[in-house]
Amino acid sequence: MDKQHIGQRVVVGLSGGVDSAVTAYLLKQQGYEVIGIFMKNWEDDDDSEFCSSNIDFIDAAAVADVIGIEIEHVNFAAEYKDRVFSEFLREYEAGRTPNPDILCNAEIKFKAFLDHALRLGAEKIATGHYARVRLNAATGQHELLKGLDPSKDQSYFLHRLNQTQLSKTLFPVGELHKTEVRRIATEAGLPNAKKKDSTGICFIGERPFRDFLNRYIAKEPGPIKDDKGRTIGQHVGLSFYTLGQRQGLGIGGLKAKGAQKGGGEHAPWFVARKDMEKNTLWVVQGHEHPWLQSHTLSAQNASWVAGHAPASGTLSAKTRYRQADAPCAMSAATDEAFNLTFPEPQWAVTPGQSAVLYDGDVCLGGGVIDSSL
């Protein structure tokens, strides 16, 4: 046990998953006074088969019991609906594809939850994210770094965190690979050591995404057109599609003569553009179609870890999660917006998603993609 941490109170967000469980376990081993908080962020149809927060709370409580810490069940559903879900729906209705996990981290896990933890007398909060925080001695700034496991790094989802939030946050599993986290959980006898990772966001869970959206957004059917302007089908509503989408278009059996190079008449169709004014969905054949390639993008609603935009220059960026960093040049950067230019074209750059910038392992921040060419 590390005596320097004895008496320091840390509140851990226990989700019921193995990553947050090992986070709490490691901090307890380091001598911290650990309190677990289970966040309930969604109430609509919470008793359904798709959103298992009751099961997750039972798992989180079982972990707390084994570790020997208190756990509190806190309801942030009102804040979530107001700050995250309403924005999620607004973006989809505008034809964009938002990333609610990013907004949830900024507004709930590192704002509402952090405020609650501080009221409990905590000096720090901790979560099971695969990321790291480092204090740069030269600048006095807290830096957000990628997690050491490249296949699990979650810095992309955390890029909107600011200096105050990072100064109060610990990411213990960010120093580990997932296999090591599983091993620690097994050796510690944690009951969820072999629990599979959750996918997606709770309020959607494993249910078909279009079925979920259909409950909140009206359908406005319209034409599906190919790159030659031919109507080849009908869409159910532009909000229900995203750029690069291949499944669920209802045109899989159609052929197109003289399909684009790299395609062929049996090549799959992809969503390439959405015309909101004319309610038209544009699709193309072939993964490498020019309409799916972008060399530039503009982003708005920027957020910078350091509190201000980095200097223009050569950096790297992700335009979607689980994408390799792509070299880019940043220009016209302000505290609110920036432009990126890529030597190599980026595939299906999607308005509403986030472009996140890196300098090596350091996440600098990012913004919401507004347009691309």
Image: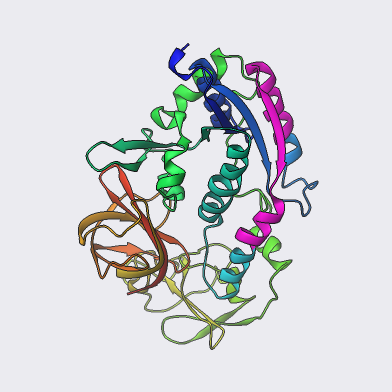
Q: What x and y, as percent, mark residue 280?
A: 54, 83
Q: Which portion, as a residue range, is magenta?
A: 56-85
Check residue 67 for magenta coloring: yes
Q: What x and y, as percent, mark residue 23?
A: 52, 27
Asked if residue 289 is positioned above or below residue 25 in the image, the reply reads below
Q: What x and y, as percent, mark residue 237?
A: 62, 76
Residue ID at (62%, 67%): 89
**Dividing the picture into quarters, in which one does residue 87 lie?**
bottom right
Foreground of the two, 291 or 85: 85
Foreground of the two, 257 or 68: 68
Magenta region's main secondary structure?
Answer: helix
**Dividing the picture into quarters, in which one does residue 212 lie?**
bottom right
Disc count in the image? 0
Asked if residue 331 is positioned above or below residue 6 in the image, the reply reads below
Residue ID at (37%, 78%): 258
Residue 284 in sight here: yes
Asked if residue 168 is positioned above or below residue 79 in the image, the reply reads above
Q: Furthest-left residue in view?
A: 313
Check residue 138 for magenta coloring: no
Q: What x and y, as percent, mark residue 242?
A: 52, 67
Foreground of the two, 47 or 235: 47
Left or right of residue 10: residue 135:
left
Residue 294 in sight here: no
**Dividing the picture into quarters, in which one does residue 7 lie?**
top right
Left or right of residue 197: residue 311:
left
Quadrant that contains the C terminus: bottom left
Asked if residue 39 is positioned above or below residue 332 in the image, the reply reads above
Foreground of the two, 259 or 284: 284
Residue ID at (55%, 62%): 247
Q: Specify the color scheme.
A: rainbow
